[in-house]
Amino acid sequence: MDKHAGAVSELVDQLGRLPGVGRKSAERLAFHLLRVPEAEAIALADAIRRIRSDIRYCQACFNLCEEELCAICRSGDRDTTRLCVVEQPRDLMSLEQSQAFNGLYHVLLGRIAPLDGIGPDQLTIDALVDRVRNGNFSEVIMATNPNVEGDGTSLYISNLLAEFPVQITRLARGITAGSVLEYANREMIADALVGRQKL
């Protein structure tokens, strides 16, 4: 038997479906929303409703936006010769926060994961190949996640782009600055050795 009133119980159930939110956290959030001023709770509901109705994928790069093109694709200040390929819009946001890249992006909206039933046709790979074919890119940076699926997706795409006159690179990996070798795992050390650079 549920110990909460119907509306509260439904809110707890819905909040509990969010990633990383268990039953106790969902209850805390629900009771927090009951305590805040009504305008604050309504603003949250409106923001959720708005992202479902107003947010779409950029027609060029598949980033999230409210217009046909995202702010990055509309900007005249970006380096249009470099294209960074990422799996999800949140990956693009992480790279943008670093302020180390000023080129354009392409969001795949996932990665090739045969065990999960996700193949190349379910991603934006065809649109990426078209962009490279019709663009003036000199470099395509593969910034997929450093795991089996991400590396497989990168390899698949780099094979498709091999016919074009672009340099294909990937993000550096390995030992981070300020770390100690004895605490690095063997995958980090292997990546660091493979991707070693000239001094």
Image: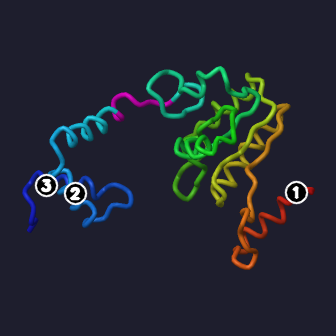
Query: Which of pointers 2 and 1 lies earlier in the amino acid sequence?
Result: 2
Mark nearer the viewer, 3 or 1:
1
Assess disc 1: are there few (<14), some (14-19) or many (≥20) residues with their C-alpha within 10 Å of its C-alpha.
Answer: few
The residue carrying mark 3 is 8
Please name whichever residue, 101 or 85, is drawn nearer the observer in this view of the structure.
101
Alpha-carbon distance for marks 2 and 1? 51 Å
Does the magenta-highlighted stretch encompass residue 55? yes
Residue type at tag 3: Val
Q: Is residue 63 left or right of residue 191?
A: left
The residue carrying mark 2 is 13
Residue placed at 33% from the left, 30% from the top? 53
Q: Position of residue 47 (x, y in %)?
A: 31, 36
Instruction: Find the magenta span and give its range.
Output: 51-57
Q: Is residue 76 left or right of residue 32?
A: right
Residue 8 is drawn in which quadrant?
A: bottom left
Assess disc 2: are there few (<14), some (14-19) or many (≥20) residues with their C-alpha within 10 Å of its C-alpha.
Answer: some
